[in-house]
Image (cartoon, helix red, strand yellow):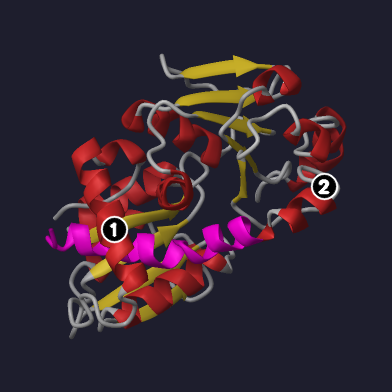
Amino acid sequence: MKSFLKIKDFSLAEAREVLSLAEKFKTQRGSFCADLLKGKTYALIFSKSSTRTRVSFEVGIREMGGQTLFLSANDIQLGRGEPIIDTARVLGRMVHGAVIRTYGQEEVDLFAQYSGLTTINALTDEEHPCQILTDIFTYERKHGSIKGRKVVFVGDADCNVARSFVHAAELFDFKLTCAAPDGYQSRISNANTTLTASVKDAARDADLLYTDVWISMGKEAEAQERVKAFQGYQISTELLRLAKPDCMVLHCLPAYRGKEITEDVLESRAEDIFEQAGNRLPVQQGIIAHLCGVR
């Protein structure tokens, strides 16, 4: 049973197939693959709270004819210490697929292994693969192929979104520059990735400027230290002037105005940013359809 646990689980051809399916789900909403999941139930296992991820998966699966069963840590024995492999063995005998949003990457890996179910990583501390495919889909619908383009990530370059971008840069062959202060730079890199502490150098001639919150879930105890460290690592009007005239600005949300992005930039680019959020729906439907064998 094929799963999507990290960006590298897909070849370029498979990722392109997902994006092609996503376009069909977006333009033919409610009619494309409307019965694909008929009679099937997907478990949504969320140890981390969510707005966009939960709503997009629940709506997406239901529009494909399936049912969803939402399970928080308080709803199942995982919250009381049951090993993930035992939960996986039980659910593997009852549901047809699983979407997991949790902390450790090893949890989704073990779940997929022991459940035998199609499993989708809806976010871990290590990666956020569904988000990155959505970002690429959003960029390409407006600006064409991302291949060879310059993508700049500003902020905590060691967060899950940035790490997935590093893998995606290699897969889709675009140029990624991560602008982050010392101690917050990506632990992984490749030939498509440049690491720098200079926000201004990074932003020059950018095709896409991207940011995320300075304080991710689970990092709240570091809030004061992080706010101090990330001063200046912000997408602002001044930074945007260094990028290409048609540069896109994206943010995976939630956004904290005045921190990682200024109020004026967020509002002036709101159409793209909230379109990006809405695109989680068709892209995740595309991922499910691909995993179910739709070509």
Residue 290: within the magenta?
yes
Res 105 quadrant in image: top left
Horizontal arrangement in the rendering, residue 141 relative to residue 179 (left or right): left
Q: Considering the numbered disc 1 on the image, is that residue within a helix, a strand or a loop?
A: helix
* Residue at position x 59%, y 52% in the image: 252
Horizontal arrangement in the rendering, residue 220 relative to residue 32 (left or right): right
Which three-letter amino acid code belongs to the residue tagged 1?
Ile
Residue 35: within the magenta?
no
Q: Earlier in the sequence, mark 1 or mark 2?
A: 2
Horizontal arrangement in the rendering, residue 218 relative to residue 7 (left or right): right
* Residue bearing mark 1: 287
Which three-letter amino acid code belongs to the residue tagged 2?
Thr
Residue 219 shows in this picture: yes
Residue 275 position in % (x across, y down): 55, 62
Q: Considering the numbered disc 2 on the image, is that residue within a helix, a strand or a loop?
A: loop
* Residue at position x 37%, y 66% in the image: 282
The residue closer to the viewer here, 69 or 145, is: 145
The quadrant in which the N terminus is found is bottom left
Q: Which mark is residue 262?
A: 2
Residue 11 shows in this picture: no
User: Could you tell me what secondary structure mostly forms the magenta stretch?
Assistant: helix
The residue closer to the viewer here, 276 or 78, is: 276
Residue 12 position in % (x across, y down): 24, 37
Farthest residue, direction front: 245
Magenta stretch in the rendered image = 271-295
* Residue at position x 45%, y 37% in the image: 164
Horizontal arrangement in the rendering, residue 245 relative to residue 149 (left or right): right
